Image (spheres, grey):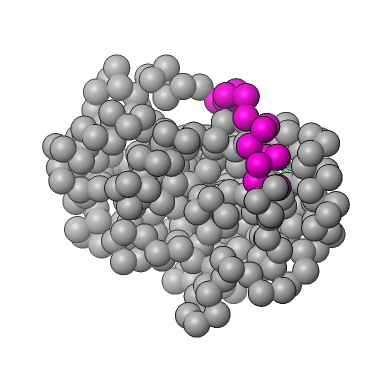
């Protein structure tokens, strides 16, 4: 099923690059990217190739996923120029620290077969290790060197954000967290918005677990789209960017086809009722 393409308030027709959201450092990031969590190198190479053909221009990987080499192979094999693709990766929490983060970054570049990334992220604060401020200093240096165009963090509680900003004066461009209708992260979103940080949702579909909710089926039918498209559009209308994961060609295409329909305020109210506070992953304080 495909969304109809009427005028979309999320798409400005004045600029050419209208599906990218401005970041606080002057760069722009696609609102929708392919997430590759849990894909093997082989799966990832196929999925990235499909996604680039389908029009995706953002790929989100991580050292922890063990598939940066597959992403690099797909990027190298693609006709889409490197400069047109927004590539994001993340330092493993075990490598949080200054020198260790710089080393991990070099390793990621080799695997990705590139000499810069568009976004480098601290994957987890791992507060018991207490090395995330040093990792953040390393990211600041990488940004100064131009090897990471933008820098950000993932899975930070507001107190972790406060600390890196207080100790370095540098505000992340992007904050990636688990976020979906079951776990809408009101506090984090408000906090990020206040600092001018773009919130990005990982597991935007709650790993696919909420897609048979009758309320989503009903809203999807009314707009001629699928429940997954409803959820992804809900994110975008909340100014949250998304990195849905899929290895399936139809679903990869569907997850980018989000521009051209809008949800009503009644739809938003109905989706708000899906909140249960359930995470699919761990509390960031518990990953050390
Ligand atoms: P698959 O890879 O077989 O498409 P999340 O990004 O929230 O972690 O969700 C990923 C899960 O949701 C995966 O299991 C993925 O399976 C499934 N998924 C991704 N896109 C869709 C879609 N459009 N419709 C249904 N399931 C989807």
268 drawn magenta? yes
- For the N terminus, the image quarter is bottom right
Q: Residue at x 66, y 42 (%)?
A: 269
The structure residue drawn at horizontal position 36% and vertical position 60%, both measured from the top left corner, is 23
> x, y percentage for residue 183?
57, 31
Does the stretch in magenta take in 192? no
- Which residue occupies the foreground of this view, 80 or 203? 203
In the image, what residue occupies the spot 25% across and 48% down? 171
What is the span of residues highlighted in magenta in the rendered image?
A: 267-281
Q: Nearer the viewer, residue 78 or 255?
A: 255
Quadrant where ligand 1 appears: top right
Q: Quick check: 215 left or right of 163?
A: right
**Residue 54 shows in this picture:** no
In percent of width and height, residue 256 lies at 66, 60
Residue at the front extreme, as displayed: 266
Above or below, comparing residue 214 to residue 234 in the picture: above
Residue 258: x %, y % from top left: 68, 60
Our reading of the magenta stretch's main secondary structure is: loop
Q: Nearer the viewer, residue 147 or 195?
A: 195
- Can you give x and y, in whole percent of width and height, for residue 44 in the image? 63, 48
């Amino acid at each position: 099923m495909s969304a109809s393409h009427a005028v979309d308030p999320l798409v400005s027709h004045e600029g050419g690059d209208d599906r990218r959201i401005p970041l606080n450092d002057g760069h722009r990031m696609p609102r929708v990217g392919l997430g590759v969590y849990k894909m093997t190198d082989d799966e990832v190479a196929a999925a990235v190739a499909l996604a680039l053909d389908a029009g995706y221009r953002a790929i989100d990987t991580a050292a922890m996923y063990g598939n940066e080499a597959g992403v690099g192979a797909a990027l190298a094999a693609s006709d889409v120029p490197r400069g047109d693709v927004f590539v994001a990766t993340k330092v493993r929490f075990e490598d949080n620290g200054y020198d260790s983060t710089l080393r991990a970054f070099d390793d990621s570049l080799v695997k990705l077969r590139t000499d810069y990334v568009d976004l480098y992220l601290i994957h987890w604060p791992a507060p018991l290790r207490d090395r995330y401020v040093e990792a953040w200093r390393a990211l600041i240096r990488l940004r100064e060197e131009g090897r990471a165009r933008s820098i950000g963090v993932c899975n930070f509680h507001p107190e972790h954000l406060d600390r890196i900003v207080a100790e370095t004066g540098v505000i992340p461009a992007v904050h990636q967290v688990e976020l979906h209708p079951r776990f809408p992260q009101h506090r984090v979103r408000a906090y990020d918005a206040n600092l001018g940080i773009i919130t990005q949702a990982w597991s935007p579909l709650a790993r696919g677990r909420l897609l048979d909710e009758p309320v989503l089926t009903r809203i999807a039918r009314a707009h001629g789209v699928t429940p997954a498209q409803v959820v992804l559009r809900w994110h975008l209308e909340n100014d949250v960017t998304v990195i849905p994961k899929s290895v399936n060609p139809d679903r990869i295409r569907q997850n980018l086809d989000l521009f051209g329909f809008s949800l009503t305020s009644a739809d938003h109210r109905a989706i708000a009722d899906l909140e249960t506070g359930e995470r699919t992953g761990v509390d960031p304080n518990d990953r050390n």
